[in-house]
Amino acid sequence: QVQLVESGGGLVQAGGSLRLSCAASGNSFNIYTMGWYRQTPGKQREWVASISSGGGDSRFYTDSVKGRFTISRDNAKNTVYLQMSSLKPEDTAVYYCRASLSRYEFWGQGTQVTVSS
């Protein structure tokens, strides 16, 4: 079992930055692929970024955030981050952290990000 707790959301003006954190409890954090997703009311949850297990050598982003968002992980702290820059109003959403390993997946409760124009 892995419990995930997101933090770092808030209200920011367009063009600003935020860093989201996702702290994981439990053992063996480094074996999980970690991802960030987001969801707005009435829409399906959307994948934003992923980072591979271990050292996180592989990172992937949805096209709309490439060049603006950076995902990283600190296995010593059992934490994954999402650095968001040049934020746009369309980035407004609840952001969720996900840990996955084979058929297992765990989700956090989400953190709200609101970008004002």
Image (spheres, rainbow, N blue to C red):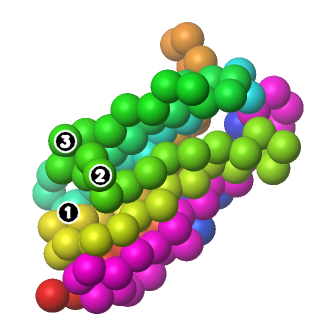
Three-letter code for the amino acid on which mark 2 is drawn: Gly
Query: Toward which corner of the image does residue 15 lie, by quadrant?
Result: bottom left
Instruction: Give the magenta range.
Output: 8-29
Q: Tell me: 37 left or right of 99.
A: left
- The first of marks 1 and 2 along the sequence is 1
- The first of marks 1 and 3 along the sequence is 1
Question: Percent x, y for residue 37?
Answer: 37, 46
Element under disc 3: helix
Label of residue 67 in the image = 2
Question: Percent x, y for residue 33?
Answer: 57, 27
Which quarter of the image is occupied by the N terminus?
Answer: top right
Q: Tell me: 75 left or right of 58.
A: right
Say which residue appears at 52% left-offset and 13% top-offset: 103
Furthest residue in direction front, as rendered: 67
Label of residue 55 in the image = none
Is residue 17 shown to the viewer in this render?
A: yes
Who is closer to the viewer here, 17 or 24?
Answer: 17
Three-letter code for the amino acid on which mark 3 is drawn: Asp
User: Contact (CB < 8 A) between labels 1 and 3?
Assistant: no
Q: Nearer the viewer, mark 1 or mark 2?
A: 2
Question: Percent x, y for residue 43?
Answer: 15, 52
The relative height of residue 100 versus residue 23 in the rendered view (above or below) is above
Label 3 neighbour load within 10 Å: few <14, some 14-19, many 20+:
few
Who is closer to the viewer here, 104 or 32?
Answer: 32
**Residue bearing the label numbered 3:** 63
Query: Toward which corner of the image does residue 61 lie, by quadrant?
Result: top left
Is residue 33 shown to the viewer in this render?
A: no
**Residue bearing the label numbered 1:** 41
